[in-house]
Structures are given as structure tokens and as C-alpha cells.
Image (cartoon, helix red, strand yellow):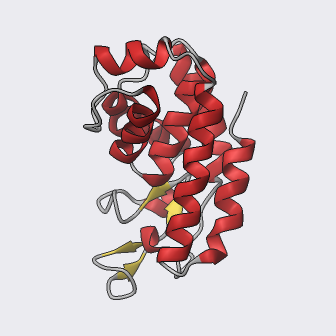
Amino acid sequence: MSELFEKCIEIVLKNEGGYQNNPNDSGNWVGGYKTGKLVGTKYGIAAKFFPDEDIKNLTLERAKELYYENYWLKMNLDGIKSHEAALQIFDFGVNAGTRRSIKKAQQIALVKVDGYVGKQTIDAINEYKGDFVKDFKHLRRVYYEYIADKNNNGVFLRGWLNRVDHTHF
């Protein structure tokens, strides 16, 4: 695991917290929201996306492995020079989906929006002339407000917005 990942994962884990099984959080369900089995989330590893993991007994080391394999490597973040930018993209990917996070980054960096990080995306983020982190955080807030309104789940909005504000080194 890269040094940058090790720095970023500590912040993400603080944002995610420990075990919870809120029945109103769709990520806590396996087999369908409120129709399947309520299993929970631990360290942000959601039963919905990792149905074969023993969520309640998940170790911190296993959670880090899952984040590295399924988020960090998938998002190809080691080439991003700004640690703050990499952290923002990673944290949003964990919370809202990897492709969504990459697409938002590409939208800001003014490159082809396809949800995959290659050399063009990395170069554009690294050479961005404005304040990439500020602009990315703004798009995160807009997205969370949209989701809270669209899905009528404003109960989570304050937490999401606090997450944006507290995601930094």
C-alpha cells in the first residue's frame, strides 16, 4: 500500500467510524433496501457492496485491504501530486461511489468525463490552475444537497456536509 493511501485512509476511517446498522441507511442492507437482511456497516464497509464479508466482525486491517483494492487502486490516485486533492477524491469515492467521484474531478479538470483515471485526468488535476480542492468540495456539497432533496433523506445531509468540512490533513 502506498504512503499516500496510508495517509488518506486514516482520515477516511475517522469519517466512517465503527459499526452501525441504521435501518434507514440503504448501505446496511443485503438483498434489497428494507426488503433484505439488515447487516450493517463497519469502518464504512457496507454490507450492500460487500455481502460476503462478515461486517460485524470485520477487522481494521481487512477494511483497509478492501479500501485499497476496491477504491484506491480502482481510482488510480497515486499519481495525483496534491495530497489534499487525492484525499478529497478518495473520500468522496468511498461515500458516493468511485466513478461518481472521478467524474466530478474530471468535470472540474475539464477533461473527458468517463469515470476512469488515466494519464490525461491525472495531468489535468496536477496542472489545474484554480483551487482544485475548493472546487471539488463545492461539487461534493452540491451533490449531497441534491441527493438529500431527491431522496427525501435530509437526515443525513448535516453529516455529509460535516464530512466535507472535516476531510483534510
| 76 w.r.t. 15: above or below | above
Where is residue 141 drawn, in percent x and y?
Answer: 61, 53
Instruction: Work out whether residue 87 can be spotted.
Output: yes
Q: In percent of the image, x 40 and y 36: which residue is there?
A: 107
Out of 30 and 75, give the one closest to the viewer: 75
Out of 30 and 55, give the one closest to the viewer: 30
Q: In percent of the image, x 30 and y 16: which residue is there?
A: 120
Query: Among all residues in the image, which is located at the extreme bottom?
Result: 35
In screen coordinates, is 127 left or right of 135?
left
Where is residue 133 drawn, in percent x and y?
Answer: 62, 30
Out of 45 and 120, give the one closest to the viewer: 120
Q: Quadrant of residue 22?
A: bottom right
Instruction: Work out whether residue 65 can be spotted.
Output: no
Q: In percent of the image, x 33 and y 88: which residue is there?
A: 35
Out of 39 and 83, give the one closest to the viewer: 83
Figure disc tally? 0
**Quadrant that contains the C terminus:** top right
Q: In percent of the image, x 65 and y 53: which residue is there?
A: 17
Where is residue 75 drawn, in percent x and y?
Answer: 36, 31
| 21 w.r.t. 112: above or below | below
Q: Quadrant of residue 137?
A: top right
In screen coordinates, is 150 left or right of 19?
left
In screen coordinates, is 164 left or right of 95?
right
**Quadrant that contains the N terminus:** top left
